[in-house]
Image: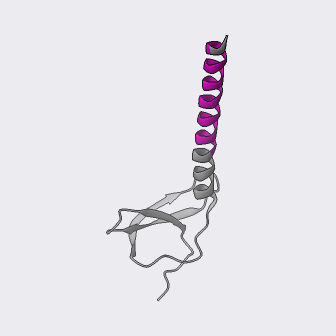
């Protein structure tokens, strides 16, 4: 009987761990998706690439950081600070 209880407890802990990891991953993705940029961070260069956001219909310009490889999508009306 103790063995069955131990397996049940182990299954319960693994299940809770999976749920916590899944929640953190989706929460992190949602946080990035909803973020809006006030100004272009230093090190980013504007590219010629322009795309239209399918959910809002807004034209987005791609800015690229050569050092990190990171890309950010900014509404076309935003300007780079001088």
Q: Is residue 54 visible?
A: no
Q: Is residue 66 left or right of residue 4?
A: left
The image shows residue 55 at horizontal and vertical percentages of 63, 51
Q: Quadrant of the N terminus?
A: top right
Whether residue 12 is situated above or below residue 73 in the rendered picture:
above
Q: Main SS type for the magenta part?
A: helix
Q: Is residue 28 left or right of residue 44?
A: right
The image shows residue 60 at horizontal and vertical percentages of 52, 63
Q: Residue at x 50, y 85 (%)?
A: 81
Q: Residue at x 65, y 24 (%)?
A: 9
Q: Nearer the viewer, residue 57 or 7?
A: 7
Q: Nearer the viewer, residue 24 or 69?
A: 24
The image shows residue 59 at horizontal and vertical percentages of 55, 63
Q: Quadrant of residue 49?
A: bottom left
Which residues fall within the magenta stretch? 3-23
Residue 16 falls inside the magenta stretch: yes
Rendered image coloring scheme:
one colour
Q: Is residue 78 visible?
A: yes
């Amino acid at each position: 009987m103790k063995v069955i209880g131990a397996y049940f407890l182990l299954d319960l802990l693994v299940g809770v761990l999976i749920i916590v990891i899944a929640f953190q991953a989706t929460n992190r993705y949602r946080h990035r998706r909803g973020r809006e940029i006030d100004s272009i961070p230093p090190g980013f260069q504007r590219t010629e690439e322009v795309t239209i956001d399918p959910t809002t219909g807004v034209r987005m310009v791609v800015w690229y950081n050569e050092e990190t490889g990171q890309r950010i999508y900014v509404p076309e009306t935003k300007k780079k600070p001088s």
